[in-house]
Amino acid sequence: MTGTDQAAGQVKLFCRNLWKVYGPEPHQFFSGERGARQRGDRAELIRRIRAADHIAAACDVSFDVHEGEIFVIMGLSGSGKSTVIRCLSRLVEPTAGQVVFDGQDLLKASSKELIDLRRHKMGMVFQNFGLLPHLTVLDNVAFPLKVQGVAREERVKRAMEIIDLVGLEGREASFPRELSGGQQQRVGIARSLAVEPEIWLLDEPFSALDPLIRRQMQDEFLRLQRLLHKTIVFITHDFLEALRLADRIAIMKDGEIVQLGTPAQVVMEPADDYVTEFTHDVPRAKVLMVRNVLEPAADGLDTSDAVAETMNLEEVLPHVAGRIDPLPVTDANGRLVGQVTPHAVLNALAGKQRRKG
Amino acid sequence: MIATNAVSALESAFHRRNYDPSLAVWLVTGVAVVALFALRGQYDWVTKLPEELVIPLEAWLNAFMDLFVASFKWLFRAISGLLEWPMNGLQALLHWLPWPATIAGSVVVAHLAGGWRLAVFTLCTLMYMVIVGYWDESMNTLALVGMAVPLSVAVGLFAGILDFSYRPAKSVIQPTLDLMQTVPAFAYLIPVLLLFGFGPVVGLVAATLYACPPMVRNVSLGLQRVPVDIVESAKMSGCTDRQLLWWVRLPAAMPTIMIGVNQTIMCALSMVIIAAIIGGFGDIGWEVLSTMRRAQFGQSLLAGLVIVLIAMNFDRISRGLTSRQRVSQARTGTLWQRHAHLWVALVAIMVAVALAQVLPELHDYPKAWIFYPAAVVNDAVTWFTANYFFATSAIKSWTLFYFLLPIRIGLENSVTPHFWGFALNLWISLGYAAAVAGLALWVDRATSWRGAVAVLITGGLFYFGTTGTPWAVFILVVTVTAFRVGGWRVGVFALGGLCFMLFTGIWERAMLSVYLCGTAVLIAFLAGGLLGIWAARNDRVSAFLRPINDTLQTIPLYVFLIPIIMVFLVGEFSALLAVIAYAIVPAIRYTEHGIRHVPAETVEAARAMGCTPRQLLWQVQLPLALPEIMLGLNQTIMLGLAMLVIAALVGTLGLGQMIYIALTAADFGKGAVAGLGIALIAMITDRILQSWSARKKVELGLA
Ligand SMILES: Nc1ncnc2c1ncn2[C@@H]1O[C@H](COP(=O)(O)OP(=O)(O)OP(=O)(O)O)[C@@H](O)[C@H]1O
Ligand SMILES: [Mg+2]
C-alpha cells in the first residue's frame, strides 16, 4: 500500500514541490539557471538557504488530498505545518511550487478569483479561533455571508442552522469573550462551515483547549464529518489526535515531509527515528487493524470463525488467544481476503517494526 | 532563562575590569575637550560663533510666511468662516440651554460612564462653576473643545489609516508626528494666528492640530496590533481589502483607538486653555491668565480650579465611555431598558428647559447668588507672605545662588566672596578637580568606566556652567555620546540638530533652556525616582500616589503656575518649581513600574541567594529596572520642555521666552526657529535615551 491508492475519491487538491522561504530575498534561490539546477537537490538547496540566513519554512512539500478524505499534517512546533496550510489558501504566498485546487492553479489566481474561491469553496479554522471580538456569535458565524452581500434575513437563517449544528443554540447573542475556549472554537467551526466550503482547512483547531474538551471536540468533529463529507486538511502537533482523525498522515520535520501514509503505516513502519519517537506512546492495539497484519490466505485455511479486516487488534486478541494456526479474514462483504496469524498480531503489538525498505 | 541572564549580569557587574575599545573614543574626546578649553582664551570663536556665520533663518521664514499668507489668506479665511459657523452654533446652544439642563445631561452621561461616584463628582464640578459664576466662561471653553475633538478624531483617524495602510505615507507622517509632539504649544499658535486671524477659530484650529498626533498614533498602532488570527480569518471569509479595513481591522482595533480618543480630548482641552493667551474667546483659560497677570491670586485660583475639575471630568468620563465593553444583554430588553440613560437625559433636559421658561433663575443663574471667595484667598496669601516671606525668600535665594547659578554660569563665575565667603583661587579649583577625579575613580571601580565618564562630564559642567561651556565642547560631547549610544544615525541627528541651533543664532538661549530644564529634570527625576522606589516597595504609598499622579497629568499646564507664584512670586525659581511639579509624574510612574515588573523569578532567585532588601534593590531591582527608568527620564524631559515654554509666562530666559515674545509680536520666523530648537533638544535626548534603553533591555534579556 502506498497511501495514495487507498483513498476513495479523486484528487481534490494537490501541491507539488511547494517551497516557502522567509528572508530578505527569498526568490534568489529559485530564479535563474542556478536556481533551476539546484532545485533538483533538495538537501543542497536547504543548506544553501540556511547558509544565506533565510528560513526555509516549507521545503519541497508535495501531497494529494482526495475528495472526502481527512488529511492530517502532523509535526512539532515550528516544523512548518501552518506555513503549508496557509500556502494552500494563499494566506501565505509560496516562494515556489504549485497548488492545484479542482484543476485550478491557485498560485496563478488573481486576487479577485482568490476572494471568490475563499468565499465559496474554502473554510478555515484557526488555533486561536480568530473570532471578531466586536461581533456576537451570530454575527461572527454570519460574517462570511455578510461579506458576500447575502441579505441579513437569509444569512441569519443560515447561521442559525449551523449554530444548531455545532451545538451552540442559545448562545447566539453572546460576544466571543463571554464564551469558554471550547465554545469559541465551535463558533470558529460554525463560521468556517457557513459558506458550505468544498475544502475545509483546520490549523490546530483543538490545541488551545484542555485535554478533556479536546477529546470531546474530536468526537464532535468526526460526527460532523460523517454528516458533511468534506475534504479536509487538518493540522495538529498531537500524534494521537492525528491517529484518531486521519485517513492519511503527513509527518513534517523542519519544513520537510518525512513520512506520508495511513495511521497504521506510520505506526508499523516509521520512516526514521523522528517518527519512531512519536510511535512509542501509541496504543497500538487500538490503532492497528487486522488489515495491517494481513497475510495471503494459506491453502486449505479453515474459513469458520473469520474476523473482519476492519477490527482493531484489541478486538481480535480474544480470537487469537491460545491459538497457533491462522485466522481467516473477511472484508465488509464477507469475502475472504487473507489470514492473520497470532504471531503477526503479537509482533505488531510488541512494536517489532517492519522498517520501510 | 531571564533569571540566569540577570544573575550573570549581576556577577559581571562585580568583576568588570575589561576595558573595551570604545574607551579610546572617550579618551580622545577628553583630550579634545581639554584642548578646546585651553584655546578659549586665545580664540573667540570657541565660545561664540562669529556673527557673519549666523544664518538669518528667521528672516527667511518670515519672508516665506508673508508670501504664503499673501497668496493663501483667502483660503484660510474661508476655512475660518466655515468653522466659525458650527462653532458659534454650539456656543449659542450651550448658552441658551438653562444650566440645570446642561448639568442634568452631563450627570447622566457621567453615570453611564462611571456610575454614581462619577455622577456625583460631575454634579459637584458643574455646581461649582455655577455658584462661583464661571458658567459662561466654562461653556465657551466647552464649545471650543466640543468642536476641536470631533475634528481631531476625524483627521487623526484618516491619517492613522493612511499611515497604516500606505507605506510611502508612513515616512512622511511619522516624522511629522515626532515634530508635532515636541514643538511647544505656544509655537503652534503663531502660524495659526497669521493664517486664521484673531478670534476663537485660532483656538479651535490650534487645538485640533495639537490633539491630532495621539489619535494618529493610536489608530496606526491599534491597526498594527490586530491579531494575525483575526485578519487571516477575515481574509478566509473572503473579505476584500476595504471590507477587511472597515469591518474587521478598525472594529478590532477599537480599544486602542479609544485610548487615542481619550488622549485627544485631554490634548484639545490643554491647547484650548493655552490658546487663551491670544485672548478673545472669553473662556476660562483667559480668566486664569488675566487674573494671574494682575496678581489676583484668589481669582486665578478659583478659575484654575474650574480647569482642573473640567480636566478631571473629561478624563474620567471619556475613559469610562471608551472602555465600556458591550455585553450580550444589550440586545435584549425593551427599547426603554436598552436606552435608559438616553431617555432619562432627554426627559431631564426637557423638564429643565420647560421650567426655565417660568423661572428665570434657572435660565441665568442670578448674579446675586454667586459666591466668590477670592478675597478670602487673597487675604490668606497676603497673611502668608507677610509672615513667611523670610522663609520663602531664603529658600529661593539659597537655591539660586548655590545651585542654579553654578549650573548656569559655572562655579568658575559664580563663586564670589559675597555669597560663598571665599573667592575661587587656583587651589580651590584644583581641590574641586581632585574631588571630581576621585569620585570618578570610585565610580569606575564600583561600576564601569562609563559611569566615570558621566561623573567627569557632570563635574565639568558644574564648574564651567552650561553657558560657560564652549559650544564646540558641548557639540562634541553630545555628538560622541549620541554616536556611542545609538550608532551613527543618532550621532548624525544630534550633530545636525546642535548645528541648527548654533547657526541660527539661538545657541545661548538654547543653553539657557537646557540649563533650566536640565536642572528641573534632574531634581524631578531624583525626587520622582525615590518616590517611585518607595511606591514600588509599599502598596499603600503606591495607592496614595496613584490618584495624585493621575490628577497632575490631567491638569493643563497653566494651572501649575498659580499656587507657585502665589508663594514664590514670578521668577526663575517659580519656573523651576513648575517644571518640576509637572515633570515628576513619569519619573515616579516609570520607576515604580520598572521595579515592580522585574521578573519575579529573578527576585526570588536573589532572595534565595540571601540578598538583604537593600542588596535586592541596589543590585537586582534597580539595574534590571534601569531601562524602564530611563524611559521615565525621557518622558520627564519631554514634559519638562513642554512646561518650560509655558513657564516663560512667569519669567524665564531662553527659548521659552523667545517663543513667548515671538507670539506676542506674531513673529513667525522667531517662533518657528525657537520652537524647532526646543523640538530638537527634545528629539535628540529622546533618541539617545530610547536607544540606550532599548540596547540595555536587550543586554538584560528583557526585550
Ligand atoms: N512571517 C515569518 N517570518 C519569518 N519566519 C517565519 C514566519 N512565519 C513562520 N516563520 C518560521 O517558519 C517556521 C515554520 O513556522 P510554522 O508557523 O509554519 O510552524 P508550525 O509547524 O505551524 O508551528 P506551531 O505548531 O508552533 O504552530 C518557523 O521556524 C517559523 O519561525
Ligand atoms: Mg502553527
Image: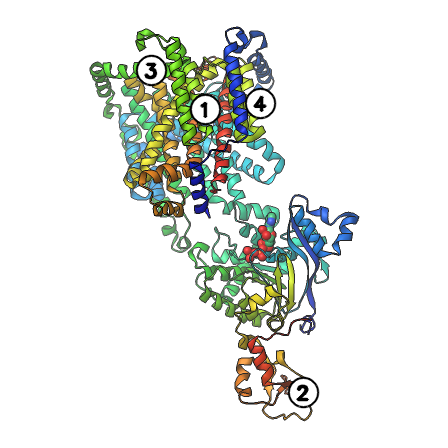
The location of residue B576, given as percent across then percent down, is: 36, 20
What chain does badge 2 belong to? A
Label 3 sits on a secondary structure element that is helix
User: Marks 4 and 2: which is nearer the front?
Assistant: 2
Q: Determine the image quadrant of residue A268.
A: bottom right
Q: Determine the image quadrant of residue B144.
A: top left
- The amino acid sitting under disc 4 is Leu
Left or right of B179 on screen, residue A309: right
Residue drawn at point x = 51 percent, y = 17 percent: B33
Let me know if marks 4 and 2 both belong to one chain: no
Q: Earlier in the sequence, mark 4 or mark 1?
A: 4
Classify mark 4 as within 8 Å of ligand 1 or not, answering yes or no.
no
- The amino acid sitting under disc 3 is Tyr
Classify mark 3 as within 8 Å of ligand 1 or not, answering yes or no.
no
| Disc assigned to residue B75 | 4
Closer-to-camera residue (B684/B482)? B482
Label 1 sits on a secondary structure element that is helix
Which residue, given by chain and number where applicable, does mark 2 sit on? Answer: A297
Q: CA distance from mark 4 to mark 3?
A: 55 Å
Closer-to-camera residue (B247/A333)? A333
Residue drawn at point x = 57 percent, y = 52 percent: B234
Which residue, given by chain and number where applicable, does mark 1 sit on? Answer: B203
Q: Counting other residues with Cα less than 10 Å from the Cα at mark 3, is it few (<14), some (14-19), or many (20 or more)?
A: some
